[in-house]
Image (cartoon, helix red, strand yellow):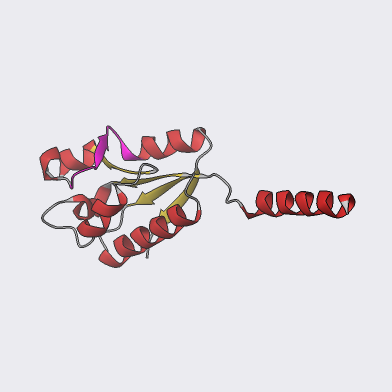
Amino acid sequence: MKKLLVFGIVFILVLNAFGQSPEVQIVFDITSPDEGVHQSAIRHVTMMSEAYPKSEFELVLYSSSINMALKEKSSVSDALVGLLKKENISMVVCEMTLKRHEIDKEDLIEGISTVPDGILEIIQKQKEGWGYIKESK
């Protein structure tokens, strides 16, 4: 009986260890103006953040993807607002892109931050060991 109890405890511990989701850190590179790409990125981050709740995710927007982050132009603004309420998800926009398109930071959806350079942000994250996903068509 004692051996059976010990086996049961060990079995439960092993199942629990393998059943837990691994922690990951992933940066998403988004440059496309395509709304389908924006929707796909939101879907990916949503599913991954639910599957790996102890992980970190960052979306980096630059170049032609800027409309995704704008209050008045984003086709995914409602979904973004919901995502950005999660502590393990962040979204940043390249300040050089804002400058090139003559956009003020106040035009961004609430919760979106800026970084001086989107490409350098991605490179830095990769140097820190973050995984990389390019969202494209």
| Picture residue at 20% right of the left edge, 57% below the top | 77
Q: Nearer the viewer, residue 118 or 39?
A: 39
Report if residue 104 is visible in the image: no
Q: Quadrant of residue 125?
A: top left
Residue 86 placed where, x, y %?
A: 34, 46
Task: Name above or below for residue 115 compared with residue 52.
Answer: above
Residue 69 placed where, x, y %?
A: 21, 50
Residue 44 placed where, x, y %?
A: 41, 60
The segment highlighted magenta reads 109-118
Residue 7 placed where, x, y %?
A: 83, 52
**Quadrant in the picture for the C terminus:** bottom left
Report if residue 67 is visible in the image: yes
Q: Quadrant of residue 45?
A: bottom left
- Decide whether the magenta segment is chiefly helix, strand or loop: loop
| Picture residue at 18% right of the left edge, 44% below the top | 110
- Is residue 68 shown in magenta? no
